[in-house]
Image: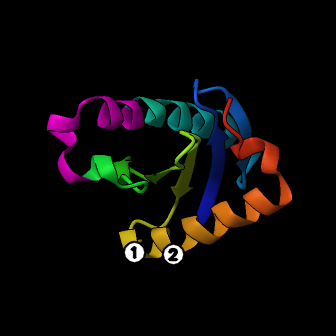
């Protein structure tokens, strides 16, 4: 179950954040999403630590919390997609199968979000 979707620009500026839970969880999800940007930046900026994931646009699981799993996707224009799931049994392949069509849909409906800044 997806509980939050966020899109961030090249400079980690929020372009879109939507949570799909009750209002009291919204602030916690925003915090989790913003913390996940640090993990994405660390993997992109430290190629020796991140290994083969640097060349991919799907860094996979960024980190798990007690309740959520946080996944990321990086476009070739450095726009970051963050997905927070409630289901702890989600596999990377399931998220990848969601992220790529989701990115394509965003590109069709809001092309300005994925343009180079």
Q: Residue furthest right?
A: 109
Numbered circles on residues, count: 2
Q: Position of residue 107 (x, y in %)?
A: 74, 57
Disc on res. 43: none
User: Quadrant of the image for the C terminus?
Assistant: top right
Task: Report the residue at 16% width, 37% height from top.
Answer: 49
Viewer can see residue 112: yes
Kindly report the distance in space between the C-alpha atoms of the residues bearing marks 1 and 2.
6 Å
Q: Looking at the rendering, which quadrant does residue 10 occupy? A: top right
Left or right of residue 10, residue 72 in this image: left
Residue found 24% across the figure and 30% down from its top: 46
* Mark 2 residue crowding within 10 angstroms, few (<14) / some (14–19) / many (20+): few
In this view, 85 is above or below 110: below
- Residue corresponding to mark 2: 97
Image coordinates of residue 98 in percent, x first then y, are: 57, 71
The residue under the point 40% across, 65% down is: 88
Q: What segment carries the magenta color?
A: 39-52
SS label for mark 1: helix
């Amino acid at each position: 179950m997806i509980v939050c979707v966020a899109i961030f620009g090249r400079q980690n500026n929020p372009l879109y954040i939507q949570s799909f839970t009750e209002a009291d969880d919204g602030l916690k999800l925003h915090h989790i999403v913003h913390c996940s940007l640090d993990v994405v930046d660390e993997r992109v900026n430290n190629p020796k630590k991140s290994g083969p994931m640097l060349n991919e646009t799907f860094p996979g699981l960024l980190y798990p919390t007690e309740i959520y799993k946080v996944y990321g996707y990086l476009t070739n224009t450095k726009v970051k997609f963050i997905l927070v799931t409630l289901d702890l049994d989600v596999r990377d392949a399931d998220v990848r199968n969601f992220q790529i069509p989701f990115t394509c849909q965003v590109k069709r409906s809001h092309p300005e979000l994925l343009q180079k800044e």
